[in-house]
Amino acid sequence: MKSIKSVFKIGNGPSSSHTVGPYRAAQYFGRRYPQADAYRVTLFGSLAFTGEGHGTGKAICAALPGTEVVYNRNETNLPHPNTMLFTALKEGKEIGSSRIFSIGGGAIRGETEALDEDREVYPQKYFSEIVNLCRERGISLAHYIARSEDASLREDLKTVWAAMQDSVRRGLAAQGELPGGLGVARKAKLLYEKRCYNESADVAMNRVIAAYAYAVSEENADEHVVVTAPTCGSCGVLPAVLYYMQTDRGFPEAEILDALAVAGIIGNVIRTNASISGAECGCQAEIGSACSMTAAALASLYGLNIDQIEYAAEIAMEHNLGLTCDPVNGLVQIPCIERNAVAAMRAISSVNLSRFLYETRKISFDEVVDTMYRTGKDMNEKYRETSHGGLASIYRNQ
Ligand code: SF4
């Protein structure tokens, strides 16, 4: 597996596979054909159906100004649901082209070559292999990660954590309507400040964590800077819970960074053996993965053992299985923002169950990841980030 550093990418929302990936692909193509005087990009599949709402053209033009962006919604025989055809032109003539795929979380792949240069860092591929190694050596997951990665990981995680905290704070301070024409108002500040009479500690915790998740997801929907965790659409879950644990519960930053690393290794196992792309496997691959990463991070922060961490991650994914991707009007707002808040609370419930029931568990984390991937591959295309099914189709019929 590659470094966990590439699980967490800092960039502009609202969609890692529809903005961060295409932006990086455009940068790559521009470097490859610097002699071109014009560029054209044809978007296929999910990028063609939801690219306008997700701001794909804008992201490409930010990297390659003046590029002509074409949305091809007719081609169905595609090698990947997020396919882009880049063409370089000089004096009106084609001088080169490349098909590039946006494979999730901002990562890109060429038709014949790997474009992301990350080297392989972990010999292990499955979580079961990691658990066996940790047991053999008597080390924690956080130690396993620190020993496998290079010395720059800690600094990298500090930068990532700072960017996550910034997105929470900015989102909590902002008000007004999100762009795109859906008329969705920002709610993070309202939720954060709205206390019920005689509010119990539990209700207050859920409200505040939900407010943090809204804050980050609203920043994402507003195309501001967020961190993929593991994607932009699901970027609010992990920061919400960790921010609460640091600012409201007083966990020290060093422990938060260890927990972030544990979240990273869970995301790494999922993207290596399955997918973190809504266009490929539905929202279970995005929000399900974020929920799993967060549950594992929280279990690790609480000092639970490796079986409890694994079970927390497994529960969190298991109860997101089958979750479809149906963003209304192709915007990452409904159901995405609320879904981040719900997933944050579900991650906490998963840890609470795993704490007590881990010795009775039947399903391993690797099995649930495999199930998520198979379920995603069986899922009708309507439910894989095309805005043709679910809430997206109902809303249009009103
Ligand atoms: S529904 Fe889920 S996968 Fe689809 S855009 Fe929203 S957060 Fe991403």
Image (cartoon, grey):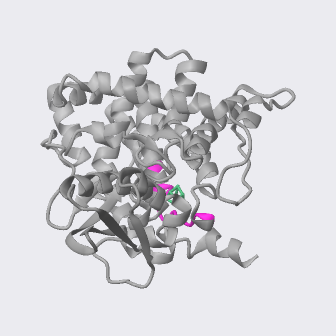
* 10 sits left or right of 193 in the view: left
Residue 239 vs residue 216, the one in the foreground: 216
* 203 sits left or right of 342 in the view: right
- The picture places residue 309, in percent across and down from the top left corner, at 38, 36
| Residue at 54% across, 24% down | 245
The answer to whether 204 is drawn above or below residue 41 in the figure is above
User: Quarter holding the C terminus?
Assistant: bottom right
| Residue at 74% across, 36% down | 191
Residue 105 can be seen, yes or no: no
- The picture places residue 265, in percent across and down from the top left corner, at 30, 39
* 282 sits left or right of 96 in the view: right
Question: Is 188 colored magenta in this rendering?
Answer: no
| Residue at 45% across, 72% down | 48
Image: magenta residue range: 315-328
Look at the magenta stretch and give its main secondary structure: loop
| Residue at 25% across, 58% down | 29
- The picture places residue 384, in percent across and down from the top left corner, at 46, 69
